[in-house]
C-alpha cells in the first residue's frame, strides 16, 4: 500500500511544499505593497511639508475635478505625479484610498505636530530655563484661540518654537491663566522655577498689574516670572 502511494505521488510536488511556496509569495506581495504604500505616503507628506514651510493654505475653495484651481496641495500633488509615474498611477487607479482628502491631510498634520512636540518636550526637559509667549485672538467665525510659543536654550542656541493653538472658552484673566497653566503643567512638572519669563500683548486682561494673566501666573505658579509686553500689538 505504501509503495503504491509513493508510486502515485512520484514526480509531483508535496502539498506542504506548495502551501509553503504560496505563503512565501503572499508575504512577498504583502511586503511589496507595504513598501509602495510607504513610498506614496512619503510623497503626500512631503507635499504637505512643502506647503507648511512656505505657510501656504492646503485647501482651495473649489477642489472639484473640473475646477481650474483646486488649491495648492491638490495642484502640487498633480504636478508631482507628472514627475512620478508610481504616484500618477496610484491617483488614477486608487478607489479606496488616494491620500488627498481633507481628513487625511488633517491626520497627517496632527501626526507631524505630535512628532514635533515630542522633540520640543525633550529639549525643554533638558533646558535649564523656559520662557513663554501667548497671544489670544478671535477669528472671523468668532472662535477664540490662543497661540503658545516657547523660548529656551538648547545646545547653546536660543530656540523659539510654536507649541500649539489653545481653544479658549473663558476669556477672563482667570480663564486664560488657567488655560496656560494646564498646558504648562505636564511640561514643568515639579520644576515651576524653570519658567522665568512670560510675554503677552498689552490688553489689560493679559498685562494688568493687579488682575491680568501675568499677575495671576506669578501667584498660581508661585514663582517670580519676568513679564514683557509683546510688540506685535
Image (spheres, rainbow, N blue to C red):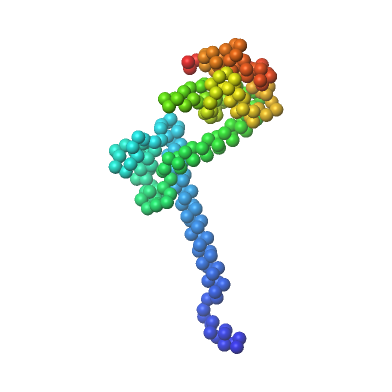
Q: Which of 168 and 80 is in front in this view?
A: 168
Q: Which of 41 and 166 is in front in this view?
A: 166
- For the point 49% across and 25% down, which residue is it? 144
- For the point 66% across and 21% down, which residue is it? 221
Query: Is residue 56 at all visible to an observer of this figure?
Result: yes
Image quarter for residue 100? top left
Direction from residue 44 to residue 206 in the image, left or right: right
In the image, residue 68 lies at what x, y percent? 29, 38
- For the point 60% across and 88% down, which residue is it? 1
| Residue furthest top as drawn | 209
Direction from residue 57 to residue 190 in the image, left or right: right
| Residue furthest right as drawn | 190
- For the point 61% across and 27% down, which residue is it? 182
Query: Is residue 46 at all visible to an observer of this figure?
Result: no
In the image, residue 220 lies at what x, y percent? 66, 20
Q: Is residue 33 above or below residue 139?
A: below
In the image, residue 11 lies at what x, y percent? 52, 80
Q: Nearer the viewer, residue 32 or 232?
A: 232
Count the marks: 0
Q: In this view, does 219 lie above or below 93?
A: above
Image quarter for residue 187? top right
In the image, residue 16 lies at what x, y percent? 57, 72
Q: Is residue 143 above or below residue 49?
A: above
Amino acid at each position: 500500500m505504501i509503495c503504491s502511494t509513493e508510486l502515485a505521488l512520484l514526480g509531483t510536488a508535496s502539498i506542504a511544499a506548495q502551501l509553503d511556496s504560496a505563503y512565501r509569495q503572499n508575504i512577498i506581495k504583502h511586503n511589496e505593497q507595504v513598501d509602495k504604500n510607504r513610498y506614496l505616503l512619503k510623497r503626500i507628506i512631503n507635499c504637505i511639508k512643502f506647503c507648511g514651510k512656505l505657510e501656504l493654505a492646503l485647501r482651495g475653495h473649489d477642489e472639484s475635478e473640473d475646477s481650474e484651481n483646486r488649491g495648492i496641495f491638490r495642484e502640487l500633488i498633480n504636478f508631482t505625479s507628472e514627475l512620478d509615474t508610481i504616484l500618477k498611477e496610484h491617483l488614477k487607479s486608487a478607489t479606496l484610498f488616494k491620500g488627498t482628502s481633507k481628513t487625511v491631510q488633517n491626520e497627517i498634520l496632527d501626526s507631524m505636530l505630535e512628532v514635533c512636540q515630542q522633540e520640543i518636550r525633550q529639549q525643554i526637559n533638558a533646558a535649564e530655563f523656559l520662557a513663554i509667549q501667548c497671544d489670544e485672538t478671535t477669528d472671523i467665525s468668532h472662535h477664540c484661540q490662543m497661540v503658545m510659543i516657547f523660548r529656551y536654550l538648547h545646545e547653546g542656541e536660543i530656540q523659539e518654537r510654536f507649541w500649539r493653538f489653545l481653544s479658549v472658552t473663558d476669556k477672563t484673566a482667570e480663564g486664560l491663566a488657567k488655560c496656560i497653566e494646564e498646558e504648562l503643567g505636564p511640561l514643568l512638572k515639579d520644576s515651576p522655577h524653570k519658567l522665568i519669563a512670560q510675554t503677552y500683548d498689552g490688553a489689560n486682561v493679559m498685562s494688568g498689574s493687579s488682575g491680568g494673566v501675568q499677575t495671576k501666573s506669578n501667584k498660581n505658579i508661585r514663582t517670580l516670572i519676568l513679564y514683557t509686553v509683546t510688540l506685535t500689538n
